[in-house]
Image (spheres, grey):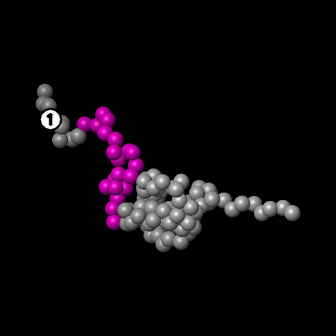
Amino acid sequence: MTRPAPRPSMLDQLYALSSAEDLFAFLDLPFDQAVLNRARLHVMKRMGQYLDETDLSQLDDDGVRAAARDALQKAHADFENSTPRAQKALKIYTQPRGNVVPMEGLRLSVK
């Protein structure tokens, strides 16, 4: 008699999803397509940041699902009425600007 293959863990199921829309559908969450069109990568990054605050190893599959659902819902809400630049979810928005000289630092020099 053969044993059925074990069901993948909740984390494995989440990692197997290929799009933000798939993630929202899997977690049974509504979303605004305009928010994803404008800030897809930022929403996913913010979700990861929220999940990093949770020790998922201490949770069973139902707990992982609830944590992922909460993190995704909060991440989406962060960008509903805000911009990626204002939220600074990606490193590019928190790094110093390097060799850029602000316009107010320039003076007109007449020769």
Residue 42 shows up from this direction: no
Q: Measuring 45% from the left and 65% from the top, which residue is drawn there? A: 70
The kind of secondary structure the magenta stretch mainly shows is: loop
Report if residue 51 lies within the magenta region: no
Q: Position of residue 81 (x, y in %)?
A: 33, 66
The magenta region covers 81-101
Quadrant location of the C terminus in the rendered image: top left
Q: Return the residue at label 1.
A: 108
Q: Is residue 48 above or below residue 70?
A: above
Q: Quadrant of residue 96?
A: top left
Q: Quadrant of residue 16?
A: bottom right
**Residue lying furthest left in this view?**
110
Crowding at mark 1 (Cα within 10 Å: few <14, some 14-19, many 20+): few
The image shows a total of numbered marks equal to 1
Q: Which of the two residues, 9 or 14, is positioned nearer the viewer here?
A: 9
**Residue lying furthest right in this view?**
1
Q: Measuring 37% from the left and 62% from the top, which residue is drawn there? A: 78
* 10 on left or right of 4: left
